Image (cartoon, grey):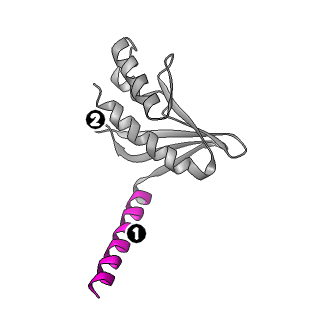
Amino acid sequence: MAKIKKELACVNLQKEIAEWVTTNTHILNFGPDTFEIETIFKDSFGETVYCFVEKTGVDKYNVTDDGRALFKLDPSASDEDLIAASEDFVTASGFSFNVENGVISCESDEQTLAEKVMQLGQLQVNISYLN
């Protein structure tokens, strides 16, 4: 009986976590193929982390931070050491990094889209602590 109660408590907790994430994640439709996602994450500045999703083809999406993570740390893009460290960190995490504009991105299909958005959100938080 105790095992059943414990399993039910875990199921309830899992449901509560899923409901909390759903309630605290907001999606704004910018157009037929572009979305802004206000994630559950806060960066080192205490600000909400945003991700952007653009549909680029049939079951193809580009997930990006639109350059916001690096811009917050170095608006003038003059700290070469920070840019290099960010690039190393981003690519080691499996994402692409555009050195010219500081955009972090990855390609996704519909099946992995939510996972990629959450991973990018967490990556932005991690990068924010490089300051």
Tag 2: amino acid:
Ser
The verdict on residue 14 being magenta is yes
Q: Is residue 74 visible?
A: yes
In percent of width and height, residue 60 lies at 66, 42
Residues rendered magenta in the picture: 1-22
Q: Residue furthest right?
A: 58
In percent of width and height, residue 104 lies at 49, 30
Q: Secondary structure at mark 1?
A: helix
Q: 19 or 112, which lies in front?
A: 112
Cα–Cα gap, marks 2 and 1 = 28 Å
Image-quadrant location for residue 12:
bottom left
The verdict on residue 122 being magenta is no
Dot 1 alpha-carbon crowd within 10 angstroms: few under 14, some 14 to 19, many 20 or more:
few
What residue lies at 37% left-to-right and 11% top-to-bottom? 78
Tag 1: amino acid:
Lys
What residue lies at 39% left-to-right and 24% top-to-bottom? 86
For the C terminus, give its image quadrant: top left
Q: Is residue 42 above or below residue 92?
A: below
Q: Which residue is mark 2?
A: 44
Which label belongs to residue 15?
A: 1
Seen in the image, is 87 located left or right of residue 64? Answer: left
Q: Secondary structure at mark 2?
A: loop
